[in-house]
Image: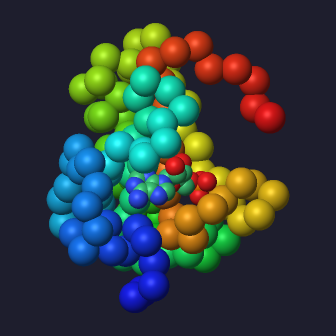
């Protein structure tokens, strides 16, 4: 999608602090980190939100989760623990309408707000 911030990051049209990339997934540090580790893991293909997922996306959702697991291991937060978040739409706190998984860790995280 042409007017999507994360599509532009996936296409390297806008710079980001990329920590992983393969054919289908790109991960980069959040610009406003909420924890010592705060990485966004996104599909390269545009999916606006979790509401748009269907059976055809099962594989890419699995790839996002497995990449989050691998990055958590790499950053040393697998054992102490971490949080994976997918915000959906307004009341879920979604601000960028390209599906993304937040990987948060490196400090004690509080209860969900
Ligand atoms: P959400 O509120 O779940 O839609 O999350 C969007 C996230 O994208 C927020 O945590 C923002 O800090 C982050 N963000 C926005 N613009 C950028 C950017 N250019 N590079 C990296 N992260 C960004
Ligand atoms: Zn997009």
Foreground of the two, 17 or 61: 17
Give above or below for 23 relative to 93.
below
Foreground of the two, 45 or 7: 7
Q: Position of residue 23 (x, y in %)?
A: 19, 66
For the C terminus, which image quadrant? top right
Q: Quadrant of residue 49?
A: bottom right
Is residue 17 visible to the viewer in this orientation of the structure? Answer: yes
Q: Position of residue 7 (x, y in %)?
A: 37, 74
Q: How many labels sit on residues?
A: 0
Q: Position of residue 56 (x, y in %)?
A: 46, 76
Foreground of the two, 27 or 58: 27
Query: How is the structure coloured here?
Result: rainbow
List the single residue furthest toward the bottom: 2
For the N terminus, which image quadrant? bottom left
Is residue 10 visible to the viewer in this orientation of the structure? Answer: no
Instruction: Tell whether 87 sits left or right of 17.
Output: right
Which residue occupies 26% across, 48% down? 17
Which residue occupies 45% across, 78% down? 4
Instruction: Tell whether 12 sits left or right of 88.
Output: left
Instruction: Tell whether 68 sits left or right of 10.
Output: right
Foreground of the two, 110 or 50: 110
Q: Position of residue 19 (x, y in %)?
A: 23, 44
Which residue occupies 54% across, 33% down? 34
Which residue occupies 40% across, 41% down? 39
Give above or below for 40 relative to 68.
below
């Amino acid at each position: 999608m042409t007017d999507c911030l994360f599509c532009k990051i996936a296409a390297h049209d806008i710079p980001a602090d990329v920590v992983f990339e393969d054919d289908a997934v790109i991960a980069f540090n959040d610009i406003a980190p909420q924890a010592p580790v705060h990485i966004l893991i996104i599909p390269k293909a545009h999916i606006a939100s979790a509401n748009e997922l269907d059976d055809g996306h099962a594989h890419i959702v699995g790839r996002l989760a497995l990449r989050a697991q691998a990055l958590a291991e790499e950053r040393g937060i697998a054992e102490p623990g971490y949080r994976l978040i997918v915000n959906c739409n307004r009341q879920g706190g979604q601000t960028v309408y390209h599906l993304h998984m937040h990987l948060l860790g490196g400090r004690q995280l509080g209860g969900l707000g």
